[in-house]
Amino acid sequence: MKCSQPLTKSVVQVARSDLTDGDNETEPARELLERLFAKTKSLDPSASRDGELSMSIEVLKTEFEAALSILRKKERDLREAEKKVSVDRSRLNQTKQDLDQREEDIIKAYGRQHEMEKALMKASRDLSLQVRQINKLKLLVEEQEKKIVNSQDALSNKVIEVDKLKQDILKKNEEAALMRSEIETKEQELRAANQALAQQESTIRELQSEVKRKETEIARSNELRKANEERLKVAEQELKKQNLGWIAAQQELKELAQMASKDKDNIKDTIDDFKRVRSLLDAVRSELMVSKEAFNFSRRQIEDQARQLSQQVKELTDQKTLLISYTQNLEAAQLEIQGKTNELSAVQSRCRELESQLLEEMKKVESLEAMLTKERESLGQKTKEVDLLQEELAQNENEYITSQKLVKTKESELLEARHEVEDMKLKVDSIQIAVQEKDLELLETQRRLDEVNNEVVELQQMINTKEDQLVQVRTELQDKEQRLQLMQDELDKMRLGRSQAESVVQKIVELTGNLIGSVEGEEFDIYSLLDDEILSTGTALESNLHKHNQLEADIDMLKESLQQKDMDLRAAYKALDAKDLEMKAVLRRLDVRDKELDKLEELSITKDNNVEQVELQKHEIESVEVEALAASTMLKKLANITKEFLTRGRTDSGTNSLASRNANVSDGASKIQPKEMDVILKAKKEIVGLFSLTEELVAGAGINNAEEP
């Protein structure tokens, strides 16, 4: 037992080393079987067969447990591969969704571009409308300038009229001085009645002429007042027209502001200019309102002056009546000198009143002069403001010219942008074609992944069936262990029988030695009996040895089948590793394709002219696909070769082993007792069942590995 244990371990280690020699590549089945048979024949026949059987069973148990652990590990790896495949599917779906989203973004960008073009067209139309409105405003400003010039002319006429009034007042002052001198002369004439009468007559005539002149002056002043009233009415109408024009201009400015508020981004400068113009127009409007109020105030003053002049006219009419009465009194002056003196005193008081009225008129004239100076100053300010407005209009014209230039540049930029957009549309179409090709490639890869998933599911099913078969093998091995224990017990019994037979032979030899001398006549019978006993014991021993050798041969066949199974499992593991590598390569290529798709999308977003790079990437993708197809074809070829190799090795080894076993069993069956034949047949059936199970496992693994793409 002690020497058999290291021998079996060494044999197993050598077999494993032979199986794993040559960079983990499997050798042909016939060579392996020949090596195993040679090594089993080279074993020491003197070693204990029972120990070898027990050690081989233990080795089988350990190998089956290792195979089960490896199968479980592979099942875990397959589950992880399924998880990776599901993750890759989710990533593919996500990439498809991203591509759809980016297509929608491109469509939205096209829509925005069309909207921007429409907005630019609308802005150009608005600019043309604004240009027309600016021209209209220019015309309105020119009309306002003309009106201001007319108002200046009217004011100059009013200044001339005021100067005339001043001259009239000076004349009236002179007349008052003359009246004073006349009164003095009248006093002198009163002293000298005769001389005074003649002088008074002359003075009465002069006064009558002066009264006529004053009447004419009053008529002139009335005409001037009427003309001033008409001019004021005309000015009021012009102011009303100006107000209406300013209101219309304000409405137009409001409309322009509303239209400009829609295009704030493109016409901010024009809005600022219009705001300035509006503020200036508001200032001009306020100044015109102030001038209107001043005109109203001057009108009121002129009306007051007209009233005063009417009062003066009344007074002059009174004076006329007084002068008439005075003439009448002068006619009766000689009789009523005292009354004339009273009248002269009344005339003096009246002259004082006239002087006070003249002083008041002088004050009014001074106030009118102050108003005229204010109006002149306001006119100067208005002229300055008009100059500023003209300068601002010139600036607006320059800005409008610059804006027209900008519009032209923007139109040229729009044309360039349209050409670029058309180029980008062509590029996007090419990219969409490439994306469609990529989608087809992705569909093909997805189909391949589905096939791989189906194959993985089939592998899982086969692994599950193999696990079930391994469980059955374990149960059968346990039964076989029990039967082997029974066989060992029977062998022990046979050994006891052999020892008993040897003791019987020794006793027979002793009995023969004792009976040689006593009984010579019965020698032949005793020798015949001894020969029969020896032959029976020899046949029993030969049958036991043959049975033992047959069991050893069956155990060796089980070892060989298990080694073959181990080789097939290793080949299946290698095929699974190759499949894992292929899956990893496919996943890497999918990652590379995702990166390439991202690069293509970045190229479509950034508007780069990298068509050559896209073509190179297409060529690279095509080369990768060609490599993948070549790898898949190579894998298929390798799978077919391994399938043929496994099927041939399995059929050859199975037929040879079964033929040898059947021949050995048929040769030794005639020499074995019925009980031993039953035991051997049962062992044979169990061994055949184990061999069939191992063949099914190896066949399933070989077929599945061969059918993998």
Image (cartoon, helix red, strand yellow):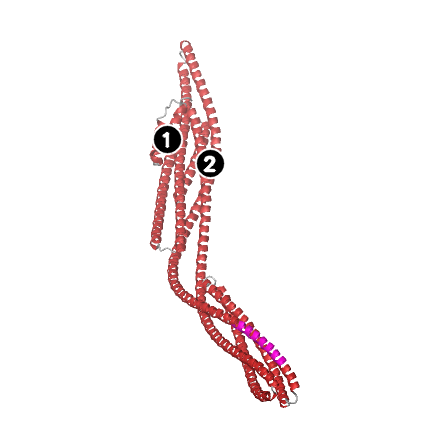
Q: Which mark is residue 15?
A: 1
Question: What amino acid is labelled 2 in the image?
Answer: Leu
The furthest residue to the bottom: 331
Relative vertical location of residue 195 with respect to residue 289 in this rendering, above or below:
below
Main SS category, magenta section: helix
Instruction: Write down the quadrant of residue 43 in the picture.
Output: top left
Residue at mark 1 to residue at mark 2: CA–CA distance: 22 Å
Mark 1–mark 2 contact, CB under 8 Å? no
Relative vertical location of residue 133 with respect to residue 450 in this rendering, above or below:
below
Asked whether 363 falls inside the magenta stretch, the response is yes
Relative vertical location of residue 315 with respect to residue 461 in this rendering, above or below:
below
Q: Is residue 245 left or right of residue 709?
A: right
Dot 2: within a 10 Å radius of its alpha carbon, few (fewer than 14), some, or many (20 or more) residues? Answer: many
Relative vertical location of residue 294 with respect to residue 492 in this rendering, above or below:
below
Q: Is residue 621 left or right of residue 362?
A: left
Dot 1: within a 10 Å radius of its alpha carbon, few (fewer than 14), some, or many (20 or more) residues? Answer: some
Q: Nearer the viewer, residue 670 or 545?
A: 545
Residue 395 visible in the shown view = yes
Q: Which residue is mark 2?
A: 470
